Amino acid sequence: MSLSLYSPFVSTGYSHCNHPNHIPPPSTTTTTSALPPSLRHRRRELRSVLTRSLDPMEVSGVDSEGKEFNSAQEMWREAIGEEGDETKKTQWYRDGVSYWEGVEASVDGVLGGYGHVNAADITGSEVFLKTLIQERLVNGGTNQHLVALDCGSGIGRITKNLLIRYFNEVDLLEPVAQFLDAARENLASIGSETHKATNFFCVPLQEFTPAPQRYDVIWVQWCIGHLTDDDFVSFFNRAKGCLKPGGFFVVKENLAKKAGFVLDKEDRSITRSNPYFKELFRRCGLHLYQTKDQKGLPQELFAVKMYALTVDIPPKVHKTRSKTRSNRPQIIK
């Protein structure tokens, strides 16, 4: 992915309202029926514009060649055709895999030439993961057989440096065969009988269905951008039933902050904004448990955010002035 892309768009208005469908009522001093027809028409137009501006899918975006799109729907129509055009959609995924097949199977290769960010990335992920394990899993995960799924595992970078130290078994999911072969080699001498890489699935994310109730954690990092919105939702709907009680998803991805989204035409991926992600999570029926911004990455790269997502509804958060309130679970709105 071209991590240094700059977008000329600034998304405004839609991220500051908890009720995206709420439009202020007409003034009590003048009824709608008393307005002249021209003003009533303009009010309806304004109401429509305000509603669209609050929808993350209706915010403008840009592609890697500088082309502007008025909405995500417009971008997807160009990228994968109208609904039902399976040929163009299949080509989208084939082109994405082809791009990565031409990339060196190394840390520097899978990180787009930014191999030096590996340490900062792993450190940020570990701090986030440790807190989640302690809070979500019984007895903080101790004396349990824990299993994780590493989605878009590449050469096994995250499994080797992080997951295998916290989980008894880690399954790796990766569509690029040469990356998965490298992962097998990289992990052959890592771990032990009680902490090991178990399964290596060479399957695209959009086609994979995990085993029921196998995983405590499903880790999704720097790969979900290759999925269309519909396949994004379909994947998580399938994967929800694959979590054990108390299990959770971690999604760690680049964020578009100067636009609603940024389409990379080279590797066939989309960088979504925070509101865009939240809308998709809502469509998946997932609940936002915790988030954390990744620190220590070069400024020319996209911002990176970690999301912890649960299937169960988090406890209700009561209004309080406690400083810890922001760290408590909340339902995506």
Image: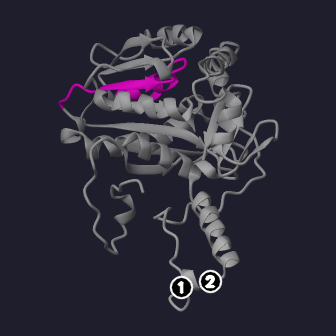
- Give the structural element (helix, strand or loop) at label 2: loop
Q: Is residue 73 visible?
A: yes
- Whether 153 is among the magenta residues is yes
Q: Quadrant of the N terminus?
A: top right
Q: Residue at x 33, y 71 (%)?
A: 322
Front-most of residues 172 and 64? 64
Disc 1 marks a residue whose amino acid type is: Thr
Q: Residue at x 30, y 19 (%)?
A: 211
From the viewer's perspective, is residue 214 above or below residue 50? above
Residues at circles 2 and 1 in contact by the CB criterion of under 8 Å = yes
Q: Is residue 127 visible?
A: no
The residue wearing badge 1 is 31
Front-most of residues 192 and 252? 252
Toward which corner of the image does residue 269 lie, by quadrant? top right
- Whether 3 is among the magenta residues is no
Left or right: 206 as drawn, with respect to 61: left
Q: Position of residue 126 (x, y in %)?
A: 43, 39
Q: Residue at x 53, y 81 (%)?
A: 26
- Give the structural element (helix, strand or loop) at label 1: loop
Q: Position of residue 293 (x, y in %)?
A: 52, 50
Q: Position of residue 39 (x, y in %)?
A: 67, 78
From the viewer's perspective, is residue 210 above or below residue 295? above
Q: Residue at x 55, y 47 (%)?
A: 276
Left or right: 51 as drawn, with respect to 141: right
Q: Residues within 10 Å of mark 1 (few under 14, many from 20)?
A: few
Q: Quadrant of the C terminus?
A: bottom left
From the viewer's perspective, is residue 277 above or below residue 9? above
Disc 2 marks a residue whose amino acid type is: Leu
The residue wearing badge 2 is 35
**Magenta residues, start to end:** 143-165
Q: Quote the CA–CA distance across marks 2 and 1.
A: 7 Å
Q: Residues within 10 Å of mark 2 (few under 14, many from 20)?
A: few
